[in-house]
Structure formats: C-alpha cells, structure tokens
Amino acid sequence: MNINGRTAVYGIIGNPVEHTMSPAIHNHISQALGIDSVYVPFRADGNLENIVKGLYSLGVRGINVTVPYKTDIMRELIGVDDVAGAVGAVNTLKYTEKGFYGYNTDVMGLERELESEGISLSGRRVVILGAGGAARAAAFMCISKSPATLTIVNRTRAKAEDIRASLLAYARDNNAGITEDAVSTMEPSDITGLPGSGYIVFQCTKVGLYPDVDSCIINDEGFFEKTETGIDLIYKPETTLFMKRVMDSGGKAYNGLKMLVYQAVCSYEIWNGISVPENVAEDVYKILKGER
Ligand code: NAP
C-alpha cells in the first residue's frame, strides 16, 4: 500500500470497532483492483453530529456505520435510498457535494449471499428469528423475493409486530406481491405450532454468538425437522449450534460470513461506481475463512 497526498480515505465508525474485519476486506479489494484508497476504523464516541461533520469536512469519501449508530446517524444525512428508509437503518454513507447520502448494504449483502448459494425464496415458507436491526434487514430482503409466507419470531413480540407493520406498509407502497395474511409473528415458545415443512430460516438473534457458543434460540427438535435451509447471520463461531441442529436434521446450513463480505463489496461498488469481480470477492471470503 502506497499512501500519498491523493489517496482516498474511507472508514468505519462504531463503538466498539476494535474487532471489525471491514478494513481487511476493503484494503484487499483496493489492492487487488489497484485503486488508490485506504480504509481505517474510527472508534466513534461522542456527539454524532460533530463526528459526521468532521468526517465530511476532512473529505472522507465513504463511511460504513456499525453498532450503535445505524439508525441515529440517519438524521445527519442529506438523504437515504428507499430500502434504507424502509428498513430504518443505514450502514453505508457516500460523500456527495451536499453531504453524506445513506444506503443499507446489509440488505444487498444478504441478497448476494443467497444468490451465491443458489437459494431462492420465491414461493417458499420463510422464518426470521429475531427482530433487531439485522432481522429488519433480512425481512426487507425477503419481502422483495415474494415468499409464500414470512413468520417473524422474537421473544419481544412487539418488535416483531413493528417489523410486520413496516413490511406491509412497504409492500403496499411498492406493489410487492405479499398479502397481510402471509406475514405473521410469534414468540419462540410457540414455534411448535408452525404449520407444514420445507422452511428457509434466517437466524438473526445474537444467541449463539461467540463466546455464547452453546446456546441456540430454538430448542424444539420438531422445528429443525421442518427446516430445509438455515442461514445464521452469525459468523463467529463458523458453525453455530443453530447450524449444527439444522444439519443434524438433514438440512443445509450457512453462516453470515458471505453476507459480511458482500455488504462490504456492495459499499465498495457504491463508493467507486464499479463492479467488484466475483473472483476478488471470493478471495476476500477465503482470506477471512483462513483458507489463504
Ligand atoms: P440487535 O439489534 O441487538 O438484536 C438482537 C436480537 O437478538 C433481538 O431480536 C433480541 O431479542 C435477540 N436476543 C438477544 N439476546 C437474546 C436472548 N438471550 N434470547 C432471545 N433473544 C435474544 O442485534 P443485530 O444488530 O440485529 O444483530 C443480530 C446478530 O446478527 C448479531 O449476532 C450480529 O453479529 C449478526 N449480524 C451479522 C451481519 C453479517 O454481515 N453477517 C450483519 C449484521 C448483524 P429482543 O428483541 O427480544 O431483545
């Protein structure tokens, strides 16, 4: 890496940011494509308005946003794209002449993970476990793929109901082919009552995240027998207990590492107006997996 007076600066803000893998991803892509840019972590603690103004006045070309700022930062932007507005969260800011503009590449990243694994949601029964920020992003991605049904399962049911209301409003405004009856909510303890089989399940809670590796949000064996495909958004550990249970019941399971790589790739593409070649994205994935 040869940093000079013209090197474009990008970064991630959050608190904490010490363990972020984003610099490794972005700097690898720049190096692979020969683009003169550098990506650094900024631990952001303090007044968000001042932080955003500071980054803008220093000419930082693009910013990723992580916990806990994905929603609060929206009021500091000149605008957000439709999906980020509907989700109510941004993770990518692009420098424009008038200020930073926001996007949500978590939604796009998960979509690209599904494409790369050959998973189609059209006409399928889908379950989202969780109702936090990641679950919201997953739910909005799903709704655009015309599933037959979408069930949001969360211990705090009111948060699942809130996502349901936002999804239905978005579906109405955008003529998405999903009806009110098709979107439902439940608590984890009611999961035994889920009808039918062949489910595609997105695990979007923090349960099972390192070091809590012996926990799983659902402990009902019958549910795993109904699960054909399980996608855990967690990528540490590489194989979560949720994934193990899906596989033990004969299903296919994936973790969230590809989503992480692709959300970064999508940010990179938005910032630079280019398409990152698939072999570069695959190299990044292998490096993060420790295979290269
Ligand atoms: P969040 O907004 O804090 O939401 C956490 C969710 O987990 C909520 O639904 C919460 O339920 C549930 N939960 C937490 N502890 C629980 C427990 N003990 N029992 C039952 N439910 C529990 O977090 P987030 O930002 O959505 O992140 C969720 C996960 O997704 C994290 O593990 C994160 O690492 C992962 N993620 C991955 C990617 C990726 O690129 N692969 C991107 C974003 C997030 P309540 O609502 O009831 O509190």
Image (cartoon, helix red, strand yellow):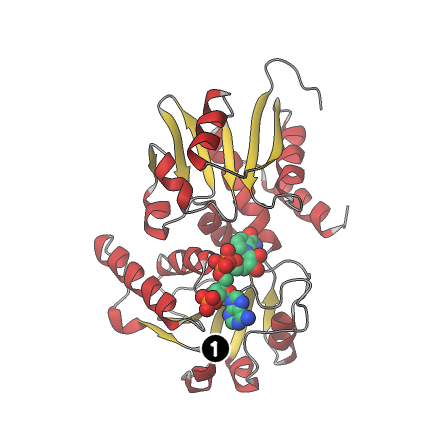
Q: Secondary structure at mark 1?
A: loop
| Residue 96 place in picture, x, y as percent | 40, 25
Q: How many marks?
A: 1
* Frontmost residue, 264 versus 51: 51
Q: Is residue 257 left or right of residue 73?
A: right
Q: Residue 290 location, x and y as percent? A: 76, 50
Q: Residue furthest top?
A: 5
Q: Is residue 137 left or right of residue 241?
A: left
Q: Of the residues shown, which amino acid type is indicated by label 1?
A: Gly
Within-10-Å neighbours for mark 1: few <14, some 14–19, many 20+: some
**Residue 231 appears in the figure:** yes
Is residue 142 or residue 188 the one in the foreground?
Answer: 188
* Position above or below: 191 against 205: below
The C terminus sits in image quarter = top right
Residue depicted at 58% across the width and 37% down the height: 277
The picture places residue 125, in percent across and down from the top left corner, at 41, 73
Asked whether the viewer can see residue 114, the reply is: no
Q: Residue at x 53, y 75 (%)?
A: 228
Judge from the rendering whether residue 221 lies leftward or rightward of residue 291; answer left or right.
left
Foreground residue among 115 and 269: 269
Residue at the far front: name it.
Answer: 46
**Residue in view at x 35 percent, y 47 percent:** 83
Q: Mark 1 — residue? A: 198
Q: Quadrant of the N terminus?
A: top right
Seen at 67% across and 62% down, the residue is: 210
* Quarter location, residue 97: top left
